[in-house]
Amino acid sequence: MAHIAKKRRCSQYWQQVNAQAMQDVIQRIDRGYQLFFKHHGKGVRPPNFKKRVKYKSFTLKQNGYKLLGDGQIKIGTQIYRYWNSREIQGTVKTITVKRNPFGEIFIFVVTDYIDEHQQPMTGKSAGFDFGLKTFLTVSGGSRIESPLFLKQGINQIALANRHLSRKQKGSKRREQARKHYARVHEAIKNKRTEWFWKLAHQLTDQYDHLFFETLNLKGMQRLWGRKINDLAFGEFLQILEFVAFKKGKTVGYVDQWYPSSKTCNHCKHVLESLPLDVRRWRCPSCQAVNDRDGNAANNIKEAGSLSLGVGDVRPSQTAIAA
Ligand SMILES: [Zn+2]
């Protein structure tokens, strides 16, 4: 997808590489990407970028890419399809290709376009707890449910996959089933991403500072299997960080080892353990009845607010730092 920002503030490693060197790198990864796009979802891993920080990315200035319109971009010698999250306004300055921890690929388009409607500050902060059925529980108790198409989408993908696996290898029908599977997958992914962008705008309109727990993505994937992949928290956070950056808002993270679920938000009593299936619990110290996720979101908000400016909070600018 493409996105716009009025100004790039971070100097990027890849920008220091001259055009010819960049071309060489592009050509090298090009082959890897051809394979990756072709076999996406079949266990083939995308090519490795040189790791700088958490997200792997590279930026192209004038050369090495061409926007062909109609959702197509040429990088190196290869043409890739992408899905546009919004219209590109202004003159394109740079293009950044990023891969999130789930292997999903984003194209960020930076233009000279200046958004006249700067977002006003609201003075509000919120903590958020991720979940499977409820996508986000917000401090204060409100909930953002996972949209129905996400749940239905999982079934549709499974069905298309079953059809595919029943067809004989090398047959015409198998090729048809494979194309169908790819289309279903793509359609659901696009819908999901569109929802993520909307939600990111909605939340950053409402709050100035948004706090989350840092995610142990690998651990969560092991624990919950592919469900976590379908919900793609990592993708959502990446989009949210980008939108927050644009609006001058902050996305902050609370350490994943902070006991947000086990700490009573009322009296700060910490439980020794809290099994995953316990959704409500009574605090043995102050007798308050805590909703598991709501209590965690409240704690995340408090911990995040406390640490704001002390160094624990990751400024949203890092959203576009490579
Ligand atoms: Zn308590």
Image (tube, rainbow, N blue to C red):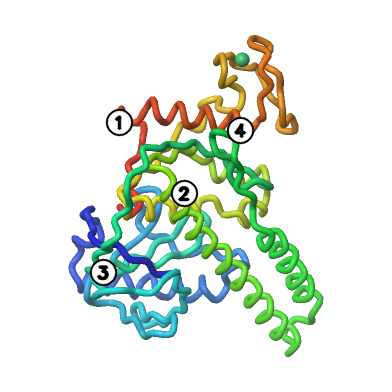
Which comes sooner in the sequence, label 2 or label 4?
2
**Which one is nearer the viewer's eye here, 94 or 45?**
94
Which quarter of the rendered picture does the N terminus lie within? Answer: bottom left
Residues packed near mark 3 inside 10 Å, few (<14), some (14 to 19) or many (20 plus): many
* Residue 219 visible, this angle: no
Q: How far apart are marks 1 and 2 (CA)?
A: 21 Å
C-alpha span from label 1 to label 3:
30 Å
Instruction: Give the mark nearer the N terminus: 2 vs 3.
Output: 3
Q: Work out whether 66 lies above or below 148.
A: below
Question: Which amino acid lies under the numbered mark 2 shown in the image of this protein?
Answer: Leu
Chain-order first, disc 4 or disc 3: 3
Q: Can residue 97 be seen in this view?
A: yes
Q: Name the disc covering residue 203, or none.
A: 2
Tell me the mark number nearer the camera, choosing from 1 and 4: 4
Quadrant for the C terminus, please. Answer: bottom left
Identify residue for label 1.
309
- Identify residue for label 3: 111
Do callouts 2 and 3 mark residues in contact (Cβ within 8 Å)? no
> Which SS class for mark 1?
loop
Q: Which residue is located at x 47 percent, y 79 percent?
A: 81
Mark 2 neighbour density, 10 Å: few (under 14) some (14–19) many (20 or more)? some
Quadrant for ligand 1 reads top right
Q: Which numbered tag is attached to residue 123?
A: none
**Secondary structure found at label 3:** strand
Badge 4 marks a residue whose secondary structure is helix
Q: What whole-number distance in Å separates the C-alpha atoms at marks 2 and 3?
A: 24 Å
The residue under label 4 is 294
